[in-house]
Image (cartoon, rainbow, N blue to C red):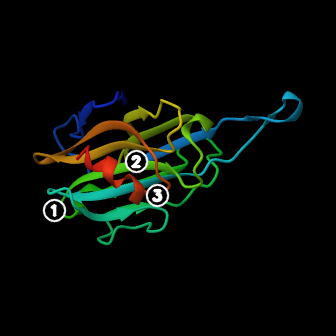
Amino acid sequence: MSISLQKGQKVSLAKPDGGGLTRVKMGLGWDAVAKKGRFGKSKAQSIDLDASCLMFDASGNLADQVWFRQLRSKDGSVLHTGDNLTGEGEGDDEVINVDLPSVPSNVAQLVFTVNSFTGQDFSQIANAFCRLVDETTGREIARYELSGSGGHNAQIMAKVSRDGQGWAMTAIGATANGRTFQHLLPTVSAHL
């Protein structure tokens, strides 16, 4: 059973049987709001949202990043499956896979962000969500609805951080502005 997260809510990623998750996927999905065309007809538009995973050490330093220009972390533990330029289709539009046991021990937090590379703001985006899935079972663990449409073109979605011997996910949902993850770093820093 999936947990629907609210901003700031944290969920442990320990399995019900006491073990920990090993392979997770962070999925991002969205739809473009139809624009009003001539004569009141709706016109479809394309929205290019980009999911990124930022890997931070315990001191809050950026150790590595995975995004549409670098689809794999240097150590191979995090893999982006590719850039979706439109948001068309059902389900996850962009996916980042994480092999948690392979994440280097110096990495304390994985922060997932989304931004509009083309600069369109969230008032033009509908049905946006991020979700964490146990890759070994296909079970959705947690879902966070990226609500709050407005003039921002980026959002700090969630973080997965070391929690004792395991990992925990925290929904962040902080709005920001920036066309790439580099522009979001000052906002991300406030949530480490």
Left or right: 14, with 156 as reference point: left
Return the disc, 1 or 3, that comes first in the chain's sequence.
Answer: 1
Q: Which residue is mark 2?
A: 26
Characterize the local packing of mark 2: few (<14), some (14-19) or many (20 or more) Cα atoms within 10 angstroms: many
The residue positioned 63% from the left and 47% from the top of the image is: 47
Q: Amino acid at mark 1?
A: Ser
Task: Measure the C-alpha gap from mark 1 to mark 3.
Answer: 26 Å
The residue positioned 61% from the left and 46% from the top of the image is: 87
Task: Measure the C-alpha gap from mark 2 to mark 3.
Answer: 18 Å
Task: Measure the C-alpha gap from mark 1 to mark 2.
Answer: 20 Å
Disc ID at residue 180: 3
Q: x%, y% of residue 115?
A: 49, 49
Left or right: 131, with 160 as reference point: right
Q: Is label 2 in contact with label 3 (beta carbons under 8 Å)?
A: no
Return the disc, 1 or 2, that comes first in the chain's sequence.
Answer: 2
Q: x%, y% of residue 64?
A: 30, 65
